[in-house]
Amino acid sequence: MIIWITGLSGAGKTTLAKALYNDVKKKFPNTLWIDGDIIRKHYQNTKKYDQKSRIEQYKKMINIAKFCYDQKLNVIISVLYFNNFIFKNNKKLFKNYFQIYLKADIKDLVRRDYKKLYSKNIIIFARSIFLQGLLFMNSSKLSSKLEKSSPLLEKLSNLSQEYDIPINELAFNFVRSVKGISSIVIGCDNISQLQQNLSLLETEPLSSKIQHHILNTFSDIEEEIINPSLWSNN
């Protein structure tokens, strides 16, 4: 069995993995725990954090995990880096595979910041704030892989009408209000879209009432809805 725990730095991966390991090992002594930070300490050439270096670290971890798995050992893995390639590869490698993604508010991560990662002049970019256009789709005309998001789109539409604020403005200013996010990346297909996106900079910030309303309305959403890289797996 493989239990893969992932999430942003400070989300609680190590804490959960340690508690899970201590509990599972009581019933299944043949259980190991592999932590990404420990692997970094033992491999001198995995000190970098760019995508290529993270993939190299993943390969080292997955080789260890595969070896242990083939020896009939249960393996708990806590690691930060994760993408669609890793998800598909893990599902292919391991028959008994379980994945846990820890969601955490960026405000809480900045406040905790145990490793001082969010206070080292690090620029945090927010991208896909419109979920690749999903926020603007008709909730009654979604493809089968996106139909789970229909009730949420209806809530978003109602919220937009209640405050008389366009959906793109709601999304943009909500992300802009999150402490710790310093830059927002928005794509565009033409000059008109570029001008429309730039105009968002001139809009008024959301009131604390609207921010809390959004947080309360969309506080618990499945990752397969908000993570476009997983849509193809639905």
Image (tube, grey):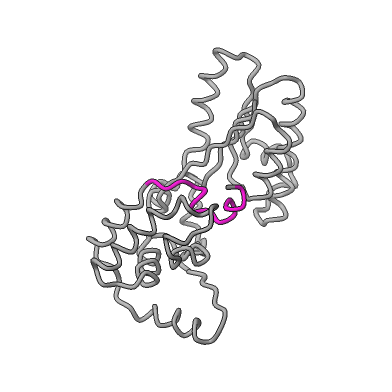
Residue 174 location, quadrant: bottom left
Q: Position of residue 203 (x, y in %)?
A: 33, 78
Give the residues in magenta. 220-233
189 in magenta: no
Residue under the point 40% across and 69% down = 172
Residue under the point 34% across and 61% down = 156
Q: Position of residue 146 (x, y in %)?
A: 51, 54
- Front residue of 197/150: it is 150
Residue 178 location, quadrant: bottom left
Does residue 29 sit above or below 191 in this rendering? above
Residue under the point 35% across and 68% down = 170
Image quadrant in which the N terminus is located: top right
Does residue 160 sit above or below 31 in this rendering? below
Q: Main secondary structure of the magenta part?
A: helix
Q: Position of residue 74 (x, y in %)?
A: 65, 23
Q: Position of residue 88 (x, y in %)?
A: 68, 44
- Front residue of 110/154: it is 154
Does residue 226 sit above or below 196 in this rendering? above
223 in magenta: yes
Tell me how many marks there are. 0
Q: Is residue 163 left or right of residue 124?
A: left
